[in-house]
Amino acid sequence: MSESSAVVSSPDLVRTLRAAGCVFAEDEADLLIAAAGPTELAGMVQRRVDGEPLEYILGWAEFCGLRIGVGPGIFVPRRRTEYLVELAVGLVRADDRGACVTVLDMCCGTGAIGIAVATALASSHRVELHACDVDIAAVHCARRNIGDAGHTYLGDLFAPLPAGLRGRVDILTANVPYVPSAAISLMPPEARLYESRDALDGGADGLAVLRRLSAAAAGWLRPGGHLLVETGELQAPFAIETFVRDGLSAGTLRSAAIGATVIVGTRPLAGAR
């Protein structure tokens, strides 16, 4: 009898997952049991033992208290990115520019960031949500998640966006790929073997996509609008230099608790020096 077919109870499942290196074996066991029928559980467990991300097996990831649909090869939203959402929502509330806010989720993947921001603001603002990604599978996934609550676009950064959006984005969020190419091989197998390399690889220094994004961002932001990008802590000073060179005021915010680093750039108000 194989190990997977022998799994018939939660204690068995926990032991199997723990032996496979799953740190949160108890939680994963509960999720798998809840998601599977009796005939499906063994196969799902074997997929997890083989190293497939739990989120792909379940078909969803938890993010900011929401269930976000995911699919094979699509970047799985990380808990640390919840900090970027928290900052974006705080900026909207602090700006207090009225009841309508335009949010653009660039490099959107599943659309998790945009959805989470829109959900958090739903009780106080009307959110016009736009999401864009270069990967067709990611765009299909984001479209399913966003539904009629926003607009999704397939293309490279700003290229597919409607011209009418230029100059009026309040919040531009972007979880750009920022892992240096040479470091991809050092990532956990769940990421490097299953997620699209395009969603991870940020070029030689991890900042290739960030530079391209920053170069065009000011033209899409309204005066006073904000660009928020997640990056690595060591890359942050270079990201700041890039934002400033491209006409944005910029600062670094960090959550040590969840290991998140976010660069916030702001387009100066008209007449500001």
Image (tube, grey):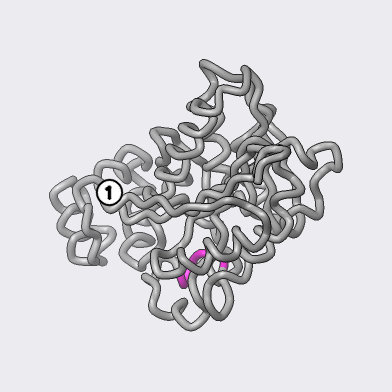
Q: Residue furthest right?
A: 163
The residue nearer to you, when weighing 272 against 15, is 272
* Above/below status of 98 relative to 63: above
Q: Residue furthest bottom?
A: 182
Span shown in magenta = 192-196
- Apparent side of residue 16 relative to residue 55 in the rendered image (left or right): left
- Apparent side of residue 52 relative to residue 106 in the rendered image (left or right): left
Q: Residue 202 lies in what quarter of the image? A: bottom right
The residue nearer to you, when weighing 90 against 153, is 90
The residue carrying mark 1 is 28
> Which residue is at 69% across, 28% downward?
148
Q: Disc 1 residue type?
A: Glu
The reply to whether residue 188 is in sight is yes
- Apparent side of residue 112 relative to residue 267 in the rendered image (left or right): left
Mark 1 secondary-structure assignment: helix
> Which residue is at 39% across, 33% downward?
65
> Which residue is at 54% across, 54% downward?
175
The residue nearer to you, when weighing 233 against 196, is 233
Q: Position of residue 79 (x, y in %)?
A: 37, 48
Does residue 130 belong to the magenta stretch? no
